């Protein structure tokens, strides 16, 4: 096993998990394109889209778990939101991840690109501008939250994303959840979703053990650091960081599809 290859995978996982912990996503929005493009650009064997989605699923599981544990102590976790969306998204993510094993790489990449494009547009729409001091004050449309979570889980399960990069914009724009509550709660929902998507990927047989372990190690180190830093950053800055990341990913994925 090439040490340079392992270091490359670790750096990808560290950067993705650090940023994911900071902005409340599972890391796949960053790791998915990096795993697709960086190893092959450096001369290593390319991962298939199925392999990348499987690796991303297990990485998201641990990154979201570690980030969630940090945010849980901050008091911004909305249990009702996690319960309603989490119970629905795990069903969708399992179905989506299981179905993805029958799809071609081009279809999986196309689904990812469409999701990222929708997330980009939503990040630039008006959002609730203020944060609340008491999480119990946060209200939301419960039936709508359940339906949206099921849809998000299904389509994001295909790419092993657990849906965090689309869940956060949906919370901010559609459900009108305050930023810090959305970030903290999305990590918990992402963790629940990743249980379904990881199970589906394992059953599909596309999981690569070594890169998965490397990314898990990177996640457990980097995600809590990003989550702690998030508490010290202005919410507007967090929103712009997330928007910039998603926008950059959209351009890269759509450019590669058009070639």
Image: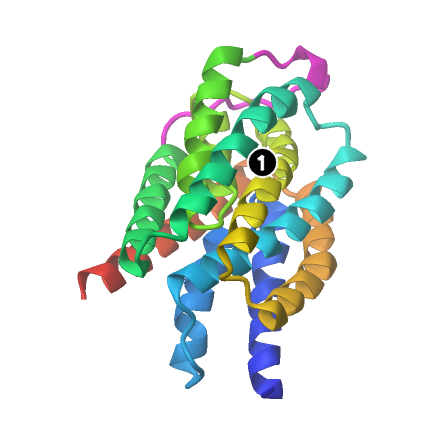
Which residues lie in the magenta part?
125-139
The crowding category of the residue bearing disc 1, from other C-alpha atoms within 10 Å (few below 14, some 14 to 19, many at least 20), is: some
Quarter of the C terminus within the rendering: bottom left
Splitting the image into 4 quarters, where does residue 189 fall? top right
In the image, residue 128 lies in the stretch drawn in magenta: yes
Location of residue 208 with respect to 193 vertically, above or below: below
| Residue 105 visible here | yes
Query: Is 178 displayed left or right of 32 in the figure?
Result: right
* Residue 223 in picture, x, y percent from top left: 68, 53
Please name the residue shown 55% across and 82% down the image. 5
Please name the residue shown 73% across and 60% down the image. 221
Nearer-the-camera pick, 100 or 191 = 100
Please name the residue shown 67% across and 64% down the image. 218
Location of residue 106 with respect to 196 vertically, above or below: below
* Residue 172 in picture, x, y percent from top left: 49, 27
| Residue indicated by mark 1 | 235
Location of residue 137 with respect to 193 vertically, above or below: above
SS for dot 1 = helix
* Residue 155 in picture, x, y percent from top left: 39, 39
Query: Is 40 displayed left or right of 231 in the figure?
Result: left
Predominant SS of the magenta segment: loop
Quarter of the N terminus within the rendering: bottom right
Please name the residue shown 57% across and 72% down the image. 9
Query: Is 248 displayed left or right of 192 in the figure?
Result: left
| Residue 243 visible here | no
* Residue 203 in picture, x, y percent from top left: 54, 52
């Amino acid at each position: 096993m090439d040490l340079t290859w392992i270091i490359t995978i670790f750096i990808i996982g560290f950067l993705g998990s650090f940023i994911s912990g900071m902005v409340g996503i599972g890391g796949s929005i960053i790791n998915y394109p990096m795993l697709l493009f960086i190893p092959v650009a450096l001369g290593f064997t390319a991962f298939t889209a199925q392999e990348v989605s499987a690796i991303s699923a297990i990485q998201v599981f641990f990154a979201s778990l570690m980030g969630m544990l940090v945010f849980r102590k901050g008091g911004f976790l909305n249990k009702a939101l996690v319960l309603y969306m989490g119970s629905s998204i795990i069903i969708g993510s399992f179905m989506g991840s299981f179905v993805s094993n029958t799809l071609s790489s081009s279809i999986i990449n196309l689904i990812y690109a469409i999701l990222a494009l929708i997330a980009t547009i939503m990040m630039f729409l008006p959002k609730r501008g203020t944060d609340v001091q008491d999480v119990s004050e946060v209200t939301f449309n419960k039936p709508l939250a359940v339906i949206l979570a099921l849809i998000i889980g299904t389509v994001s399960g295909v790419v092993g994303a657990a849906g965090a990069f689309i869940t956060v914009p949906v919370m901010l724009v559609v459900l009108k959840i305050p930023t810090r509550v959305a970030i903290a709660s999305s990590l918990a929902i992402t963790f629940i979703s990743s249980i379904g998507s990881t199970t589906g990927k394992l059953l599909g047989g596309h999981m690569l053990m070594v890169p998965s372990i490397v990314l898990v190690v990177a996640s457990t180190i980097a995600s809590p650091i990003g989550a702690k830093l998030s508490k010290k950053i202005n919410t507007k800055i967090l929103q712009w960081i997330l928007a910039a990341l998603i926008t950059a990913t959209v351009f890269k994925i759509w450019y590669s599809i058009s070639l």
